[in-house]
Image (spheres, rainbow, N blue to C red):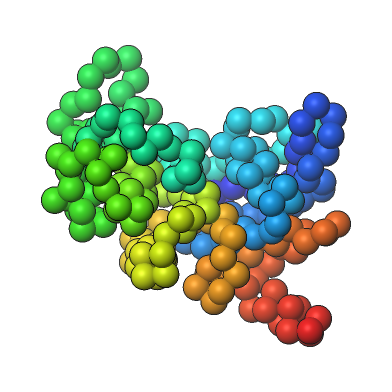
Amino acid sequence: MNLINVNHLTLGYEHQKVIQDLSFTVEKGDFITIIGANGSGKSTLVKGLLGLIKPMQGDIQYHIDTKQIGYMPQETKIDATFPASVEEIVLSGTLNRLGHRPFYGKKERKLADDSLALLDILDLKKKSFADLSGGQRQKVLLSRALSATRELLILDEPSNNLDFSSREEFYKIIHRLNKEEGITILMITHDLDMHAIAGNKIIAFEDQEIFVGKIEDYRRKMHESL
């Protein structure tokens, strides 16, 4: 089942093209890793998928309610000193479900609790986000994204600022959500180790071209270029 079809997509800013003629499909259950140098187009692609910028050419076809797309930004883009509890942070992921209601209800609070429990951090619920470690903060931000959806997650360099142990644990969680919970994942990463490029598909921004295909084909291509 296709969730998103990207057709000959060109994205950019003020007439300057960043990504040109990109096509790929996001299928249910995919784990797609997105890699490339800074400024290569990774974040631009995410902005396009989230509807934050419009295509200059081509189109993006959604076969999923766009409200069912959960987004986890880089932890560096979150104010770690913001005086909010873990519960408040995770509940904010359910905002799209409120409609015209001004307050969270029982369903939203249960969904937030379920998201925390899924990552085994329900005990952090009442703690201040500012008091958490880097690894704990990433789990909280992932829980917030899970509160928005159990369908499709877009993760923007989730291992930033994590030590080796925390990074390993975080990747195990991501793979479990994909394999056991059936959540489709698109993940931007700057890591190029075996864990970071694990999955079934890859989009690699390389100089003047973009590789789109299976992980094993990309590994073979990189091996042959050595």
111 sits to left or right of 71: left
**Number of numbered callouts drawn:** 0
Residue 1, visible in the rendered structure: no
Residue 157 in the image: above or below residue 167: above
Residue 92 lies, in percent from the top left, at 32, 31
Residue 208 in the image: above or below residue 129: below
Residue 125, visible in the rendered structure: yes
In which quadrant of the rendered image does the C terminus lie?
A: bottom right
Q: Residue at x 22, y 38 (%)?
A: 128
Q: Residue at x 41, y 49 (%)?
A: 151
* Residue 173 falls in image quadrant: bottom left
36 sits to left or right of 92: right
Q: Closer to the camera, 81 or 160?
A: 81
Q: Residue at x 46, y 55 (%)?
A: 161
Residue 30 in the image: above or below residue 67: below
Q: Residue at x 60, y 70 (%)?
A: 192
Residue 42 lies, in percent from the top left, at 66, 49
* Residue 217 falls in image quadrant: bottom right
51 sits to left or right of 28: right
Residue 139 lies, in percent from the top left, at 32, 52
Residue 184 lies, in percent from the top left, at 46, 56
Q: Closer to the camera, 41 or 114?
A: 41
